[in-house]
Amino acid sequence: MSDLNAALGKVLDSVTEEGAPRVPGVVAMVTDRDRTVFEGAAGVRSLADGEPMTADTVFAIFSTTKAITGTTVLQCVEEGLLDLDAPAREYVPELGDIQVIEGFDAHGDPMLRAPKRDVTTRMLLLHTAGFGYDFFDETYNRLGVEHDQPGVITATRASLTTPLLFDPGEKWQYGTNIDWAGQVVEAIRGKRLGEVMAERVFAPLGMHDTSFTLTGSMAARRATIHQREEDGRLTPLDLVLPQTPEIDMGGHGLYSTVGDYLKFLRMWLNDGDAPGGRVLRADTVQAAVCNGLEGQEVGMLPAVIPALTNNAEFFPGQRKSWAYTFMVNEEDAPTGRPRGSLGWAGLANSYYWIDRRNGIAGYWATQVLPFADPVSFGGYLDFETTTYRHATVGSPV
């Protein structure tokens, strides 16, 4: 394992070295089914003060929040409290008021109509309900620019009341679906999503540094988000997710440490089992990690707001699908990740994968915008590739 530590340490050092294009700092870890097998930190939390990056640094994890929200949805299904194929408006009535946008009229006003069918929670988990994001979709961006539609970063109820881009179930499009799924959980449990997560996910997993609202200790260890300028320079931003949010945004709102998130990944390697008690049943996990799309595939995410994202796609040219709620690579990836593995990412360039076949998972965290930053994303792919080149992986599950 010393070879693995040395090799992965070099990857982290290479992306934080001064002079070449770099990220301010990175924390990355790898786990097998039993324990963390690599833990590394390099660089600084902020270029403004040069405070060193440490393994317990707190990150805005953005869309890597989604899989945790999906877990709380699956728990409701296990308990017989949620029918994934029932109209989701039965749990959250506001979803019954959402219409489909068919473009803009000559005056620039949205043209809306009723959807042909109801949104279901299964569609929300699979990103087939019809919702999008303004930074990946021109129509949503226009609603924000011309009609003052608030962005999801505001964590407001109004930010979710966007029209559907197509009739529910007709295609895959990445968007605010999991935020709505979190509202389904809140309606069923009668509690804020953060409370549900704390009781039913974080407590059994021992995740003490994960929350929508920063504790004093977490705030003291928080890494600063940086903006990559057009010339490659990095500018520290005064960007903190809302700390008294109107809504706990199940799609992006959590702060966490890499060590905490690794406990969550390890649960998925172990069929839902955790040190503090089972989080999900084994049969739930086995069903949840399979492709849920019917004849649809996950494609490139186009950059509509360049300050927030570049064009983004894992493993271009390879087939990808979606599960509850992860991307599934349907072919062996060039990094060494086998077909059927899971993964996803967060807007500020955090990335993870879960290889249940070999019993290995990893998480890479930086705080850089825009998404799919070549330095951070390239470093992550190198990190994953190096892991497979050096690690001793286990037996198939």
Image: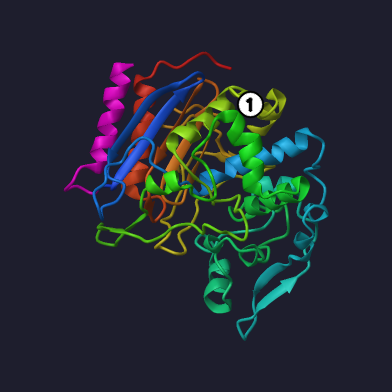
Range of residues picked out in magenta: 1-21
Say whether residue 85 is visible.
yes
What secondary structure is the magenta-colored segment mainly?
helix
Residue 158, image x, y percentages:
64, 67
Does residue 354 show up magenta in the picture?
no
- Left or right of 155 in this view: 257: left
**Which corner quadrant holds the C terminus?**
top right
Residue 276 image position (x, y, % from top left) = 61, 24
Q: How packed is label 1: few (under 14 Cα within 10 Å), some, or many (20 or more)?
A: many
Q: Nearer the viewer, residue 41 or 64?
A: 41
| Residue tagged 1 | 272
| Quarter of image, res 203 | top right
Near-viewer residue (298 or 271)? 271
Q: Nearest the camera: 3 or 81? A: 81
Tell me if residue 213 comes above or below residue 79 in the rendering. Answer: below
Which amino acid, mark 1? Gly
On the picture, is 13 further left or further right than 54? Answer: left
What kind of element bears circle 1? loop
